[in-house]
Image: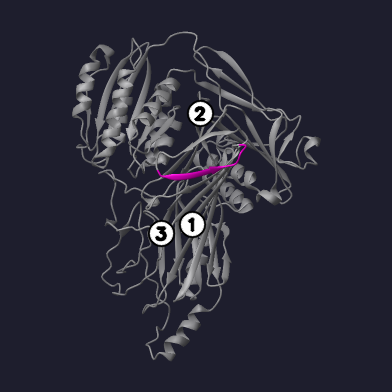
Amino acid sequence: MKISANIIDGIAEVSIFQEFETVSWDLPFVDSRYQLPIDERASVTKFSATIGDRVVRAVVKEKEEAQREYDAALENGNSAFLAEQERRDIFKISVGNLPQENIVRIEFVYVSPLETIGAEIISFFLPTGIAPKYEPTNRPQDTLSYDVDLMDKGVTIEVNATMAMPLTNVTSPSHTIEVTSNSEKSFANVVLVDENPLTRDLVIYFNTENSFKPQLFIEESDLYSSTAMLLSFVPPPLLREEIKKYEFIFIVDQSGSMGGDKMMQTKKALVSVIESLPDGSLFNIVGFGSTCEFLFPESRSIESRQIALSHIDKMEASLGGTEILLPLQKIYATKPTETYYRQLYLFTDGEVSNEDETIEYVRKFRSTGRVFSLGIGPHASRYLVQGIAKSGRGTAEFVPGNDDELIYEAVKRQMDVSMSPVLDDAEIEWGVEGQQAPYITPPLLQGKRYIAYFLYEGSSASDSLNNFNNLLVTSDIFVSVTAYDITTNKKYVFDAMTKDMIMLRGSYSDNMIHKMAARALISDLEDGGSKMQETEANYDEIRNKIVEIGLKYQLPSSETSFIAVDNYDWKGNIEMKQNDDDMTLLSSPKTYTADFDDGPYFSEDSSAPSSCLCLFSFYWCYVVMFLSFLFLV
């Protein structure tokens, strides 16, 4: 398998090339599935397969129609491929009726904006696994799990980064890397040299001289007869005029999955934050698993700090499953201490299955206090950790390794942001009428990159962009952002554009910015934050709009999927070979499936034949192909 990523400033395009070999087996017609993790903010732009020398390109269709075409292809004996969004950060790939003794290659491409850490670090993240999920006790389980021995075979990962600002350093807290750069420090090539690179998520930090500088990508598309913009900027540090008093509640995951290094990381982070609490603060610690335990009946002053440190030293991952809603429900059932601003800090690996329910619950209580989350471990659920922070008007940080300095820096950044102004009701002046996503602007937070997309019909509003030779151009386009600190009623205006911008032609960039903007519009619709939902549009109208955007821009979503069908008669070829070998023919193709939820699962089926299938010559960590009674190679 090969993974390559090309980064231009704050955008990454990731290409995943997977290759496997099919061999001989008794029953040639099979349907198998595996999961592929991606960045939750990604826009999937390409899915194709090659069987031997035949290239089969997928197209996006309405989800149910794509499933019908896939099922029909299997019934007719044709090879077929289906890519469906199971969750924002997980795709399910279904592969059916592969011919025997052949090489099959799959290409999967997505683009994604990158996060910033502080003022000078741009962070690239590549998920390589899906951690097993805990099912809350009140949710039914209809699958049986088992462990699979995963191996990395012939895996190469390479990242190329081109930055507008000079690079000062390139590091990885998760992997061993080799870095080469040009003399201007504007380009870096990063190659992983780990023997087993897929055992943990990949994180690469690109340090630049100034990531606060606003950026504007403008892409004109002849295909769509429109222009797309991507605005990216980091609000500068803001000082609050008055001193506030805070109540800090630290919610600590002590479930079984947090054992070993994860609990050690958590305890270090907790000690760091408890020791740095400002004077006059109140605090409490809540441990949770299948139950939850409060250190104090009510939050106490920092004079009780030593009791807390002794408690932290004795903490273990011994509270059972991950019932993450339980402590949140108990905390939100109590009012914040009067005259104190409540701040919740969540420490977790996020290995739960009810992510959406948890994120929505935090969103309901966002007005009662901000929520900050720290993802612990090499496979912390970014979907959950970032989703909770976003819903709670806070920030998310991740600690992939056991590096003390990284832990302390992450905690310090969150403490700084938690006691800095939150700018709400932000409005962006684009200078032209069009569609913005996100439609409801999230709070602007110190040191966190803000990204907004804009789509409008026609070409660029600036004549100076109509003819250009360079990627970086100068223009009179001006974008500004206005926001308010609602606690002080103070107004802030940001000049969110410099005279330099990055100009792209859709015919050369594969309409990358258009697709990212369209994906952001779909996300608004899926999350209930679109302009349509503001006017109380019904479910069918929302669903139809998601399908319309998905089909226009060829994007998979909750309502659209990639489907590829090879109409070559592999079945006839196989039947001829079987006749020549004097083998018993099947009267019609039979499909044997193996399905799963959030981890490697199989379903018991007493009628399934005890056939053997040898499929893959590669394994994606926690991305596994399953068949009933198969032997993995």
Mark 1: few, some, or many residues within 10 Å (few <14, many ≥20)?
Answer: some
Looking at the image, is mark 1 or mark 3 earlier in the sequence? 1
Name above or below for residue 456 compared with residue 557. above
Taking depth in this image into account, of 624 and 407 the one nearest to the observer is: 407
Q: Tell me the magenta residue range.
A: 175-184
Question: Where does label 1 land, which residue?
Answer: 2
Q: Where is residue 241 in the image (x, y as percent from the top left)?
A: 50, 9
Question: Could you give the CA–CA distance between mark 2 and mark 3, rounded to whole angstroms?
Answer: 34 Å
Sequence-first tag of 2 and 3: 3
Mark 1, secondary structure of its residue: strand
- Residue in view at x 29 percent, y 69 percent: 629
The percent coordinates of residue 310 (x first, y second) are 19, 22
Q: What numbered label is drawn on residue 226?
A: none
State the residue position of label 3. 34
Quadrant where the image shows the C terminus: bottom left
Between label 2 and label 3, give the one nearer the viewer.
2
Q: Mark 2 points at which residue?
A: 448
